[in-house]
Amino acid sequence: TPPLNQASGISTFVFITNTASGANTVVNINCDGAGLTSSRAFACRGIVFKCTVLNCTNSGFVQTTYCIFARCIATGCSTASPFLSGGFIDCISYENTVLGFTVTNSTSIRCISESNSGATTDGFSASNSILCNCVAYNNGRDGIRSIGGSNIQNCIAETNAAVGINNNNTSGNILTNNATFNNTSGGISVGTGKGNINTAPVAGTGSFFTDAPNQDFSLN
């Protein structure tokens, strides 16, 4: 059972900071920022594995120098994206009031961004990055929104409040084998940017998942 660190009566803090060089690993810790001002859970270098962030207001997972976050979860966060910088593998961001993942000059693999609410809340914001085998479901704006120069492949965007996958009129985006269904403003927007490629898109005729409203994202 992971220990729970819960903040009380403080502001502008980070639960765990790790800037040391070498093979550093943080494993199996839960941190609850309790919605307090400028609360952050992890600012790390190395690997953060199987950790959970609750109710933070200044991001949950942030790299100090390059860091891999694997099998981590964030929920109840506000103000700043809970997955703000680093590489993300098998991570889940759900029921936050800000965008689920900010992927910048990095990679996100097999991650799920689900039911993150807000008029400008995207499941993933991608800039010069790779998204592979990710799921964006029921987010407040776009499922995946590119800021440019991204490679998005084998991803599924379903039931988002705007566009499933939106290049946002930016350039140099490569989309391959992505699937969309039931997004309010359409499946994939290639946009007017230069050098965009959209290969083998799949337009679904029904939900791709076994029971997405109850967080069962196994393929049906």
Image (cartoon, helix red, strand yellow):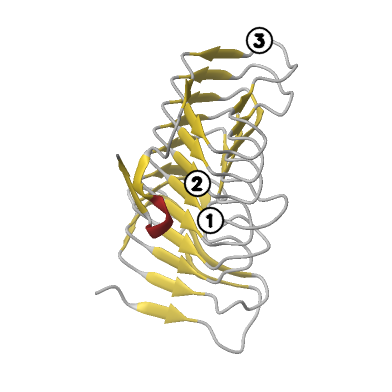
Closer to the chain start, of discs 2 and 1, is: 1
Q: Quadrant of residue 160?
A: top right
Q: Is residue 19 visible?
A: no
Q: Are marks 2 and 1 in contact (CB under 8 Å)?
A: yes
Circle 2 Cα neighbour tier, 10 Å, few/some/many (<14 / 14–19 / ≥20):
many
- The residue shown at (32%, 58%) is 50
| Left or right: 214 as drawn, with respect to 60 | left
Find disc 2 in the rendering and name its residue.
137
- State the SS at label 1: loop
Indicate which label's residue lies in the foreground, 3 or 2: 2
Closer to the chain start, of discs 1 and 3, is: 1
Indicate which label's residue lies in the foreground, 1 or 3: 1
Q: Amino acid at mark 3?
A: Gly
- The residue shown at (43%, 44%) is 88
Find disc 3 in the rendering and name its residue.
195
x and y percentages locating residue 64 in the rendered image: 53, 51
Q: Quadrant of residue 5?
A: bottom left
x and y percentages locating residue 173 in the rendered image: 60, 19
x and y percentages locating residue 25 in the rendered image: 32, 56
Q: Are marks 1 and 3 in contact (CB under 8 Å)?
A: no
Of the numbered discs in the image, which one, if any, rests on residue 115?
Answer: 1
